[in-house]
Amino acid sequence: MDNYEILRDKMVNTQLITRGISSFPVLDAMRNVPRHKYVPESLQDYAYDDCPLPIGLDQTISQPYIVAFMTEQINPAPGMKILEIGTGSGYQTAVLAYFNCDVFSIEYVEELAIEATKALAPLANVTVKHGNGYEGLPEEAPFDAIIVTAAPDIIPKKLVEQLKNGGKMIVPVGDIHSTQWLKLITKTDYKIAIKELLPVRFVPMVE
């Protein structure tokens, strides 16, 4: 094992398993996706620390636990079509792609979309688009799951509409100056159920 593999293994054992992440596929993905490749070179030594990290342009890469938790909640499986809102550096995207899903990711900041496209280029099952996450991607809908990595003030209606019946969406909701809640939306028989999971802090979702 190289040093980064050792650090990833330690991250999984001390940050994820101890906090209740129990899905073997999720733990496997977190052990194998190289988070250090999705942070600025100057911060690579901190890539497996228990914290978010800045990636420039007032954006961040989420804490590993939050990435694992959100991934576990939507339960990715091979062949699923997943929409991600907020590509950022591409780390969460790469974690989803590890499950052999078809991942479509929208990034509002054009420069980040360009850099993430380069970083994710080796992954044939990923499509990155620059655009407004509130609009979703209607031409590819419906989606088996939607994961939102920036916080809107309210749950975006158009994203709910693009969720497949039987699908799940996880999204942090709330103003940056107040408590944000990570919410799980489940669509069953075309009815929506919303469950509050835990308080979080994400950058605001913009349009």
Image (spheres, rainbow, N blue to C red):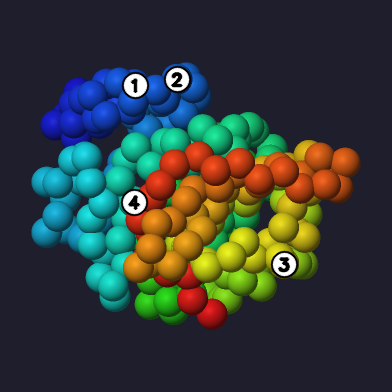
Question: Which secondary structure lies at badge 4?
Answer: loop
Which residue is label 1 attached to? 17
Separation (CA) of disc 2 from disc 4: 19 Å
On the image, numbered disc 2 is attached to which residue?
Answer: 22
> Answer yes or no: do the residues labelled 1 and 3 have beta carbons within 8 Å?
no
Q: Is residue 127 above or below residue 82?
A: below
Q: What is the count of numbered marks?
A: 4
Quadrant in the rendering for residue 139: bottom right
Mark 4 and mark 1: span between their CA atoms? 17 Å
Q: Quadrant of residue 50?
A: top left
SS of the residue at dot 3?
helix
Task: Provide the residue designation for mark 4.
Answer: 62
Please tell me whether residue 106 is drawn above or below residue 120 in the rendered image.
below
Residues marked 1 and 2 touching at CB (< 8 Å): yes
Q: CA distance from mark 4 to mark 3?
A: 24 Å
Q: CA distance from mark 1 to mark 3?
A: 35 Å
Q: Amino acid at mark 3?
A: Lys
Element marked by disc 2: loop
Q: Tell me the residue at 66%/73% (across/down).
A: 135
> For the point 49% across and 48% down, which residue is it?
182
Do the residues bearing badges 2 and 4 touch, measured as CB atoms within 8 Å?
Answer: no
* 196, 108: nearer the viewer: 196
Is disc 1 placed on a helix, strand or loop?
helix
Q: Amino acid at mark 4?
A: Ser
